[in-house]
Image (tube, rainbow, N blue to C red):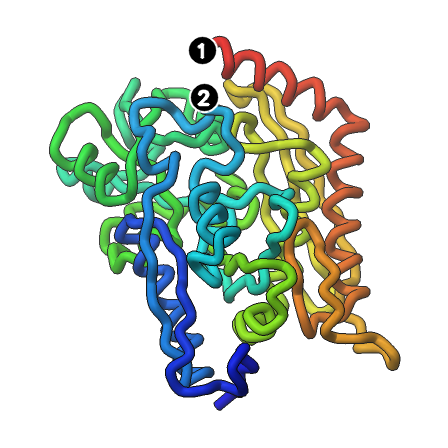
Amino acid sequence: MENFKTKDGLGQRGDVIRVGTRKSQLARIQTDSVVEMLSQKFANVKFEIVAMSTTGDNILDTALSKIGEKSLFTKELEHALERNEVDLVVHSLKDLPTTLPAGFTVGAVCKRENPFDAVVFHPSLAGNKLETLSENSIIGTSSLRRAAQLKKSYPHLEFKDIRGNLNTRLKKLDEHENFSAIILAAAGLCRMGWQGRIGQILSPEECLYAVGQGALAVEVRAKDQNILNMVSSLQDPQTVLRCIAERSFMRRLEGGCSVPVAVTTVLQDSQLYLTGAVYSLDGSECLKETMQACVVFPNEEGECPDDNAQHVGITALGVPHKALEAAEILGADLANLLISKGAKEILTVARQLNDAR
């Protein structure tokens, strides 16, 4: 059992920590899992969940890529954090911009679930794969990243926007004949207990995933050292290194949900491998490269493990600084390589075409 230094003492019985979350079923499941892990480590602390709606939850008739807001699913939660109405917030890391508002940091990135995308087929088409669907079958996805990659791999299919939380999108798939299949993050389906609906997991050759996909982030006030110390107990070093590299890549490209940017990362032995790509909206243009960097370093004498340095919005207490810096540099270097080959031009055109749709 770990001690948590609160304002009133050390893990005092009766301490209450308020945890902010979105209201959707998936968000609540994700938040419950984080609270359960914290409760096991800090038995004397009571955790109270505060659920609220966000802009992204309330705007359901417009594609995410058209709204142009970088904090669709986080802004209201951060306002509550700023007003001390909650002490920490649980997010899907892929929803968090690579630059956080002043005064906030991600204090923990939990162990990553399967980061790849999954295909859920209409019940009448169970047993199919994307390649076996008939000509002009309609696939639902709100992600430009997914659509750009899959249009190239499966030119016989049509891709249309579908919005709503997981429950809503599955209902739209099952109760109407509009969609033959929808593409969702495998991690969300697994957390909901809906693994049985997964008809196909997309390989990295078919579809690279979104930056941070499959990982949960715990956001806190950057100067609230007590809470930061507490949530850092959930940090998964491998996941945080992978996600820092991915977020650094995205930040350097100035990417977001309005442009098709995709990644995959592998940490093997001491090497972190980052593959990153940018696409035109129709998938006809693609720049894709892989780079690697050593990210295994011993904690050096004199290094302070509690130094709250941020790396693309993440404070990773206890992870060697050299490793964090190497991951961040790797992401920026890969982005610079793609930029030298014309990535900015591809993304600028993609953004303009998306705005004009």
Residue 20: % across, % down:
40, 57
Considering every residue shown, the one lying at the far right of the view is 302
Instruction: Tell me what residue is drawn at x 63 percent, y 35 percent.
Output: 277
Q: Secondary structure at mark 2?
A: helix
Near-viewer residue (157 or 357): 357
Residue 66 disc label? 2
Mark 1 lies on a secondary structure that is: loop
Q: Which image quarter is the C terminus in?
A: top left
Judge left or right: residue 150 versus residue 33.
Answer: right
Residue that mark 1 sits on = 357
Where is residue 262 shown, x and y percent of the image? 57, 38
User: Which residue is painted at 58% across and 73% down in the image?
Assistant: 226
Disc 1 and disc 2 in contact, CB within 8 angstroms: yes
From mark 1 to mark 2, how far is it between C-alphas? Answer: 8 Å
Residue 98 percent across, percent down from the top left? 62, 43
Question: Residue 329: x percent and y percent?
Answer: 79, 50
Few, some or many residues within 10 Å of mark 1 (<14, 14–19, 20+): few
Count of numbered circles on the image: 2
Label whose residue precedes the other's in the sequence (1 or 2): 2
Whether 117 is drawn above or below 345: the answer is below
Q: Is residue 281 visible?
A: yes
Q: Residue furthest bottom?
A: 1
Query: Dot 2 surroundings within 10 Å: few (below 14), some, or many (20 or more)?
Result: some
Closer-to-camera residue (74/14): 14
Q: Residue at x 67, y 34 (%)?
A: 288
Residue that appears at 70% across and 58% down: 272
Check disc 2 and give the amino acid type.
Lys
Extreme residue toward the top, this view: 356
Q: Is residue 157 visible?
A: no
Task: Please give left or right for residue 110 compared with residue 308 in the image.
Answer: left
Amino acid at dot 1:
Arg
Q: Which mark is residue 30?
A: none
